[in-house]
Amino acid sequence: MDIEEFYEANEKRRDSAEFEFGSEWTDSAGNNYELSWVEDTGELYLMLGPEAAIGQDPFGDFSVVPEEVGELHVVVIANVATLEKLLFSLEDWEEAMAQPDSLKWLHEKFGAKA
């Protein structure tokens, strides 16, 4: 589902605090993912976006072209009741994220969905 469908499916998600745990998680093909947790629902999710496009304005300045909402794909990989439990499960996540195919580490932590 795309990110807007994700929020529309449960309005508690939209109003909740969210905690991000890195945006450089990778799969075996080298795609980048962002890992986030929604406090009110306990959902830990991965978001895959398209490769960022770089644009140039008429004055020669470069900028990142905004991504279309429909191109941001979301998958919930786990439900974790509290931030404390999540932080325990994600101990050393920064080091894990830096490894090639880091989604394997998430798979080991949270099961078959990752």
Image: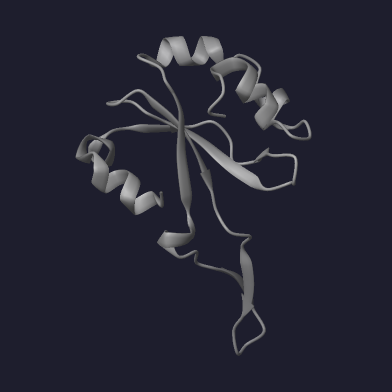
Q: Residue 24 placed where, x, y %? A: 65, 41
Q: Check the image and name the residue furthest to the bottom.
A: 58
Say left or right for 87 vs 62: left
111 up-or-down from 46: above or below: above
Q: Check the image and name the residue furthest to the front.
A: 112
**Who's the residue at 28% across and 37% down the image?**
13
**Who's the residue at 70% across and 31% down the image?**
102
Say left or right for 72 vs 97: left
Q: Residue 104 placed where, x, y %? A: 69, 26
**Who's the residue at 56% across and 23% down the image?**
112
Which image quadrant: the C terminus?
top right
Say left or right for 7 vs 36: left
Residue nearest the observer in this picture, 61 or 15 = 15
Q: Report the colour scheme.
A: one colour
Residue 90 appears in the picture as rendered: no
Residue nearest the observer in this picture, 65 or 104 = 104
Q: Residue 58 placed where, x, y %? A: 60, 90
Say left or right for 60 vs 7: right
Q: Check the image and name the residue furthest to the left.
A: 11
Residue 5 appears in the picture as rendered: yes
Q: Residue 28 placed where, x, y %? A: 75, 40
34 up-or-down from 84: above or below: below
Q: How many marks?
A: 0
Residue 27, picture quadrant: top right
Residue nearest the observer in this picture, 6 or 58 = 6
**Who's the residue at 78% across and 35% down the image?**
100
Q: Check the image and name the residue furthest to the right.
A: 100
88 up-or-down from 34: above or below: above
48 up-or-down from 40: above or below: below
